[in-house]
Image (cartoon, rainbow, N blue to C red):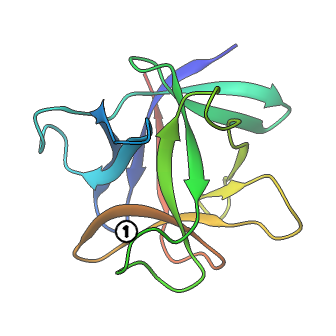
Amino acid sequence: MSKLVKLYNTTYQKYLSYLTNPTENGTYTVLMLNSDEVKDAKDLWEMVPVAQDVFTLLAPSLNAHLILLGDQNPNSPKGSAVAWLAKSSFMSPMEFKYDVDGEAIITNAGPVSQYLSALPNDPYAYFIATKIDEWEIYLL
């Protein structure tokens, strides 16, 4: 059964949020924001179970899933992927796990896991190879 949640980055004290207006290619921008910092941003997610301890993250108001795309931001860390939202018709949903001990959200695909992360003074969310910050999942 899916659960409504908010994802809070305790390292940078910001919520994983998304804009409700699509980009040119039909994806949606994912940002690290304080609650209500941007008018058209939302921070409500639906954790949709896929298997035991594995889930996708859905933006319920958009019916779009959290995905990762290659390095599309010139300021992004080398070897990182930018977090985006996309409808299933654009790209299959990414699967994730939550490492309770390490308080990390990690990908569940491929031989190497990537960690959902943020950077100081950068509004975007990234997936990187090493854990640098911690997350809390608030059930609503």
Q: Residue furthest top?
A: 1
* Residue at (30% x, 67% y) in the render: 12
On the image, the x and y values in percent for residue 71 come to 52, 72
**Where is residue 121, by image quadrant?**
bottom left
In what quadrant of the picture does the N terminus appear?
top right
Q: Residues within 10 Å of mark 1 (few under 14, many from 20)?
A: some
Viewed as shown, does residue 8 lie left or right of 34? right
On the image, the x and y values in percent for residue 24 come to 35, 42
Foreground residue among 112 and 131: 112
In what quadrant of the picture does the C terminus appear?
top left
Foreground residue among 69 and 35: 69
Foreground residue among 13 and 72: 72
Viewed as shown, does residue 61 lie left or right of 137? left
Viewed as shown, does residue 93 lie left or right of 14? right
On the image, the x and y values in percent for residue 130 come to 63, 79
Foreground residue among 92 and 2: 92
* Residue at (59% x, 46% y) in the render: 67
Callout 1, which amino acid?
Thr
The residue identified by callout 1 is 11
For mark 1, give the secondary structure: loop
Viewed as shown, does residue 133 lie left or right of 107? left
* Residue at (39% x, 49% y) in the render: 8
On the image, the x and y values in percent for residue 27 come to 44, 39
**Vertical placement of residue 6 versus 82, above or below:** above
* Residue at (59% x, 54% y) in the render: 68
**Vertical placement of residue 111 versus 22, above or below:** below
